[in-house]
Image (spheres, rainbow, N blue to C red):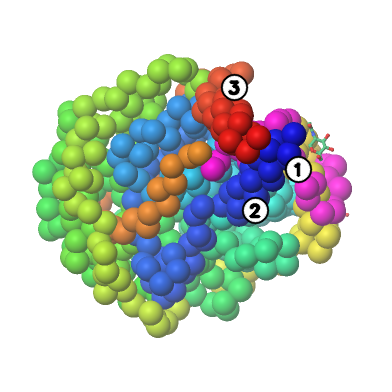
Amino acid sequence: MHGLKVAATVLAFLAGNAAAGITEPVTVKGNAFFVGDKRFYVRGLDYQPGGSSELTDPLATDSCLRDIPYFQQLGINTIRVYTIDNSKNHDKCMNALSDAGIYLILDVNTPKFSIKREYPKESYNSIYIQHVFATVDVFGKYTNTLGFFAANEVVDSPTTTGAATYVKAIIRDMKAYIKKHQKRHIPVGYSAADVTSNRMQIAQYLNCGDEELRSEFHGVNDYSWCGESTMEISGWGDKVKNYTDYSIPVFLSEYGCNTVPERPFNEVEALYSDKMTHVFSGGLVYEYSMEPNKYGIVQIDTLDAKDVKTLPDFDNLKAAFKKTPIPDDDGGYKENGQPSKCPPRTNSWEALDDIPPMPDNASKYLELGAGKPRGTNGPSNQYIPSKEQAPTDTGVAGPAPTDSGEDNVSSTKTRASGSPFVTATSSVFVGGEATNTQTSGSASPSQTSSSGADAAAPRAGLGKMFVAAVVVMTSFLAGMMM
Ligand SMILES: *[C@@H]1O[C@H](CO)[C@@H](O)[C@H](O)[C@H]1NC(C)=O
Ligand SMILES: *[C@@H]1O[C@H](CO)[C@@H](O)[C@H](O)[C@H]1NC(C)=O
Ligand SMILES: *[C@@H]1O[C@H](CO)[C@@H](O)[C@H](O)[C@H]1NC(C)=O
C-alpha cells in the first residue's frame, strides 16, 4: 500500500512537471526569433490535412499523433495550421507537438470567420472579433504556440489593397487582447501573397506607425524558386535586398513551387545560408498532405486515416534538410532596425494609415474576455452588405472557460500521465530561407485549396500507449517499494 502511494506521488510529480511544457516560448528580437539566447529559425511545414478551405481541425483529433513521427523524420521545428475549431480541445496534439520540440503558427481565421476582401469594413465586426479573441484564449496557453497569423493573403491582387486597413485593425486588437488576457506575449503577424505590385507596400504598411498597430513578424508566401533554380533566377536575391532594412522577422510562410515533377528542394540550402539568414528566418514548405492542388509530400486518404504513405518529395525534402543543418549561430540578424515608413497612398496602394477603432459592441470582449469559444456554432461574421442583413452577435463576454472542448478531461489526463515517458527532443533548430523574384499577381494555392475530409472519430493512438506505459511503470514502482 505504502509503495503504491509513493509511486502515485512520483507520477503526480512527473505529470506536474510535464504540464509546464517542454518547449520554451519563442520571442522576437530585432528581425529574428529567439528561444532563450539562441536564434530560432523556422524550419517546417504547412499542415492542413483536408485542405484549408474546409472547416477541419487537424489539432483536435488523434491524427496529429499519426503525423508527428513523420515531422520528426524530417527534423522540423514548426508547423503552420490554417484552420481550427476553437470549441474543441487541443491539449493532446499541442502537448505531443511540444514533446517533439515542434512549435505552431496558427491562422486565427476559418472559412466562417475572416476579413472579407470584398467587404472588409462590414466583416470587421464583433462576431469576428469574438472569434479571434476566443482562438487566442484557446491557443495562448500552450508554450509551443510560436505566433498567430492575423490573416492570410487578404490582399491578393493589385486591387484589394484597401482591405489591409482591417488586417491592421485586427492585428492591433489581437495585440491588445494578448497584453490584457494572456500570461505571456505571443507575437502576431500576417502571411502575404506574393503580389509583385504591392509586395513591398504590404510589408511596410504592417510595420509602420505606432507600436501598438504594428505586426511583430511577416510571412511571405513565395513560389518563385522552381526546381534547380538559383538566388538570381528565382529572384530571391532581389527580395533579400529589398527586405534588408526590415526591422521584424520575415520568413517564408509557404514555399515549394511544384511546376517540376519532383521537387529537388535545393532552395533549402539557400534559405539557411548566410545569403539569406541576415534577413530571413527560415520557412515553411507547402505542404504536408497531398490535396487537390498537388503540393503534398505524403498521401493520407482522410483526415483520420491510419496510414501515411510518403511520396518521393518527402524523401527529397528529408535529404535537403539533412544536407543543410539549421545554422548554429545568429545568422547576422539585426537587433535594432527601425520600423518602416508608411507607403504613400496611390491608386495601387489604398490602405489607410488611420486605423478605424474597434466596433463599439466588440469592446466588451477586449475588456472582459471573449467568453466561450463558439467553434462552428453561432453566426458567421460574413455577409453581403447589399443583399443580406448583418448577423446578430449572440456572444457573451467574460473570462475564457478554464477548459473548453468535448474531451477536455480525458485528454488532459492522458497527456499528464503519459508525458514522462515521451522522449523529449526539444532541440532548437536554426535555419534560414530564400526568396525569389518571379513576377506574380495572384494568390497562392493555400487560398484555393479545398478538399472534403470531414472531422471523424479520433483513433486510438499514442495516448493509449502512454496510459499502458504508466500502468506498467506504476506496477513496477509499486513492486519495488513493497
Ligand atoms: C453592434 O451594435 C450596433 C448598435 O448597437 C447594432 O446595430 C449592430 O447590429 C451590432 N452588431 C452586431 C454584429 O451585433
Ligand atoms: C470540461 O471541463 C470542465 C471543468 O472541469 C467541466 O465542467 C466540463 O463539464 C467539461 N466539459 C466536457 C464537455 O466534458
Ligand atoms: C524591390 O523594391 C523595388 C522598389 O520598391 C521594387 O520596384 C522591386 O519590384 C522590388 N523587387 C522585389 C523582388 O520585390
The residue located at (54%, 43%) in the rendering is: 420
- Amino acid type at circle 2 is Lys
Q: Is residue 32 above or below residue 190?
A: below
Quarter of the rendering containing residue 464: top right
The N terminus: image quadrant: top right
Cβ of mark 1 under 8 Å from ligand 2: the answer is yes
- Residue 403: image tag: 1
Gap between marks 3 and 1, in whole Å? 19 Å
- Percent x, y for residue 356? 67, 66
Quarter of the rendering containing residue 248: bottom left
The C terminus: image quadrant: top right
**Bounds of the magenta segment:** 392-420
User: In the visual, does 9 lie left or right of 467?
Assistant: right
Gap between marks 3 and 2, in whole Å? 23 Å
Label 1 crowd bin: few (<14), some (14–19), many (20+), radius 10 Å? some
The residue that mark 3 highlights is 458
Gap between marks 1 and 2, in whole Å? 11 Å
- Percent x, y for residue 307? 40, 18
**Outermost residue toward the front?**
482
Which one is nearer the viewer's eye here, 313 or 111? 313
The residue located at (52%, 56%) in the rendering is: 147
Q: Secondary structure at mark 2?
A: loop
Q: Is residue 139 above or below residue 243?
A: above
Label 2 crowd bin: few (<14), some (14–19), many (20+), radius 10 Å? some
User: In the visual, does 72 lie left or right of 339?
Assistant: left
Q: Secondary structure at mark 1?
A: loop
- Amino acid type at circle 1 is Asp
